[in-house]
Amino acid sequence: MPVVLIAEDDEDIALILTRLLKRAGYTVLHAPDGQRAFELAVANRPDVVLTDLGMPRMDGLELTTAIREHPDLRDTPIVMLSGHLHPGDGAPTAAGVCVVLLKPCPNDKLREVINEMAELGPHGHQGADSACPARWPVSA
């Protein structure tokens, strides 16, 4: 089973995301802040990281940057799910996020994107030969 690491500080949202992804057949790890998420990513090498933007100790952009700078994690697909971004904000793509979803996001759209990223697997995020779709924002 593919492993999804959820970095989300809101426990209610994390619980909903965990249930949704477990029902879709994923093994799910959860971290309540970006620093813990990075530690879990290093220890477990998830297939996909699903991160919030606003979190304590390390936000989603900092988490993405840390993952992209780590030699064993840099090609991990990252999806950002946030209610605090505005259309046209280039920060997620510049940090290396593959896909940005805006809260509230329909469950079927979230599952579709996570499935797509898990199937795509590790891939480059820099340069002309990058396999990263780098989509922002994804419409419901």
Image: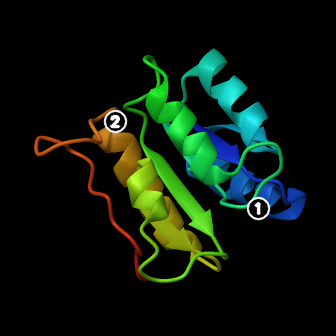
Determine which quarter of the picture holds residue 76: top left
Residue located at (76% from left, 61% from top)? 16
81 above or below 29? below
The colour style of the image is: rainbow
Where on the picture, by quarter, is residue 93? bottom left
Decide: few, some or many residues near mark 2? Use Cα within 10 Å; few <14, some 14-19, many ≥20: some
Instruction: Say which of 45 and 58 sits in front.
Output: 58
Secondary structure of the residue carrying tag 1 is: helix
- Give the amino acid type for the residue marked by disc 2 in the picture: Gly
Give x and y (percent) for residue 116: 35, 52
Which class describes the residues within 10 Å of circle 1: few (<14), some (14-19), or many (20+)? few
Specify the amino acid type for callout 1: Ile
Residue drawn at 78 percent across, 40 percent down:
31
Question: What residue is shown with label 1?
Answer: 16
Q: SS for tag 2?
A: loop
List x then y, in percent, for residue 26.
57, 41
Relative height, residue 109 to residue 56 (above, below): below
Mark 1 and mark 2 lie on one chain; the one further toward the N terminus is 1
Give how far apart the Cα atoms at labels 1 and 2 are.
Answer: 24 Å
Quadrant occupied by the C terminus: bottom left
Residue 28, x across and y down, in percent: 67, 39
Does 70 sit left or right of 12 as displayed?
left
Q: Which residue is farthest left?
A: 128
> Taking 3 as reference, is 138 above or below it?
below
Q: Say left or right for 116 vs 97.
A: left
* Residue occupied by mark 2: 121
In the drawing, what numbered circle is on residue 44? none
